[in-house]
Image: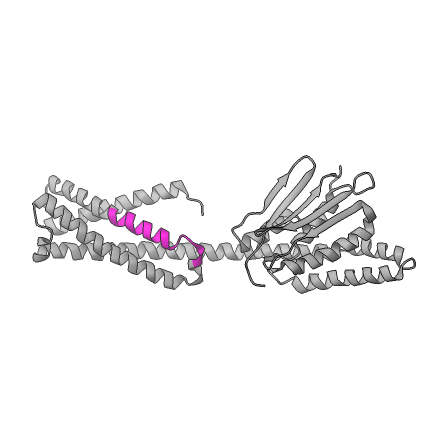
């Protein structure tokens, strides 16, 4: 999560203001309203030291505990742990700061303060005030962060559902079916076996689309089988002008239909002819599935139907912190999709 510098500065100003206010209040509580300005100044300095030491320490503790999003899996447990750790820190901080302060300013021995009710009363007062203040601050921040997280998660889920719908809509649109049936009509009387195989592949594609429409992830092997069927249909349509190779295997997962979307985009946005053949390559390593193609861009771009990279990025954002990598040169376009260690 990126740090917002204005908010960070505002937080420091609030912490300093609270420390000064608490120190002045404590001065009047223990010294009365007749306290001299020297006494107030000394106590403000004291309050700043103890207040800021509590503020900085508690801030670092809460930041460390809530730094990773995994605390959302059991937020109440994390909150209780944070409060216990912060309470323990405040107790230690107040005792240590008071021992050092009264040793320096009044020449008291380090543990002598525990022999006087006045000093014990000061420590207990500071403990109660510090714990109450940071209980309020922690609760407010916890509630705000949790609320923002759920709002963001719901928004992201809505975007993912939109992308899923757009993907399904694109695959069952009349253009894809029309092109497939047009190819089929041209071969059905020429090569019955090939036509039968074509129909089987087409059926597999639509079955897969319907099976995974509600899935967030699928195995890479499933997706590879699907894109093989899709490329088979396209190779029948374009003949030797479309070439492809697939050399990818992994036990990890991928978002459904991601490969097909990228393959479709390559076909949609590039010229495919005898003079300009399209070559699509799919491979993998330990972390990524890699899809690349040579570039022969069309002069007129087709409608994207809200698909493409934005679709894939939107769905990946919901599932992983890993970024999609895109590299483009004068004659090659390559995309690396992170493989996911998730369960379907």
Q: Residue at x 71, y 54 (%)?
A: 170
Depth order, front residue of 312/150: 312
- Residue 117: x percent and y percent? 9, 58
Depth order, front residue of 70/236: 236
Depth order, front residue of 243/94: 243
Residue 276 visible, this angle: yes
| Residue lying furthest right | 189
Q: Is residue 68 magenta?
A: yes
- Residue 182 occupies quadrant: bottom right
- Residue 319 occupies quadrant: bottom right
Colour treatment of the image? one colour
- Residue 51: x percent and y percent? 23, 48
Q: Residue at x 28, y 50 (%)?
A: 57
Is 101 on the left or on the right of 212, as rendered?
Answer: left
Residue 306 visible, this angle: no
Is 14 on the left or on the right of 299, as rendered?
Answer: left
- Residue 222: x percent and y percent? 66, 61
- Residue 166 occupies quadrant: bottom right
Is 205 on the left or on the right of 238, as rendered?
Answer: left
Range shown magenta = 53-70
Q: Is residue 14 magenta?
A: no
Main SS, magenta residues? helix
Q: Residue at x 63, y 45 (%)?
A: 335
Depth order, front residue of 168/144: 168
Quarter of the image where the C terminus is located: bottom right
- Residue 15: x percent and y percent? 29, 46
The answer to whether residue 340 is above or below residue 273 is below
């Amino acid at each position: 999560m990126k740090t917002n510098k204005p908010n960070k500065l505002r937080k420091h100003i609030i912490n300093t203001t609270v420390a000064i206010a608490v120190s002045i209040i404590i001065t009047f509580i223990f010294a009365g309203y007749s306290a001299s300005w020297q006494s107030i100044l000394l106590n403000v300095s004291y309050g700043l030291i103890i207040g800021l030491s509590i503020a900085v320490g508690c801030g670092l503790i809460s930041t460390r505990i809530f730094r990773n999003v995994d605390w959302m899996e059991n937020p109440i447990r994390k909150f209780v742990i944070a409060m216990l750790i912060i309470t323990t820190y405040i107790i230690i901080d107040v005792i240590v700061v008071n021992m050092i302060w009264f040793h320096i300013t009044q020449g008291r021995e380090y543990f002598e303060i525990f022999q006087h009710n006045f000093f014990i009363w000061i420590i207990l007062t500071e403990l109660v005030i510090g714990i109450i203040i940071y209980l309020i601050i922690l609760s407010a921040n916890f509630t705000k962060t949790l609320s923002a997280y759920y709002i963001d998660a719901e928004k992201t889920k809505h975007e993912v559902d939109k992308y899923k719908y757009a993907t399904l809509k694109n695959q069952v649109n009349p253009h894809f079916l029309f092109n497939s049936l047009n190819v089929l009509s041209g071969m059905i009387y020429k090569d019955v076996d090939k036509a039968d195989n074509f129909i089987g592949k087409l059926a597999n594609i639509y079955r897969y689309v319907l099976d995974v429409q509600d899935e967030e992830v699928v195995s890479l092997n499933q997706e590879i089988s699907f894109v093989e069927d899709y490329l088979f249909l396209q190779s029948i349509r374009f003949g030797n002008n479309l070439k492809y190779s697939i050399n990818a295997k992994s036990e990890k997962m991928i978002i459904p239909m991601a490969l097909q979307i990228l393959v479709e985009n390559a076909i949609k946005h590039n010229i495919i002819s005898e003079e300009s053949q399209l070559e699509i390559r799919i491979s993998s390593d330990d972390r990524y599935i890699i899809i690349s193609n040579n570039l022969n861009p069309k002069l007129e771009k087709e409608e994207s139907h809200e698909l493409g990279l934005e679709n894939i990025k939107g769905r990946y954002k919901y599932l992983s912190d890993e970024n999609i990598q895109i590299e483009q040169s004068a004659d090659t376009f390559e995309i690396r999709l992170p493989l996911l260690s998730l369960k379907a």
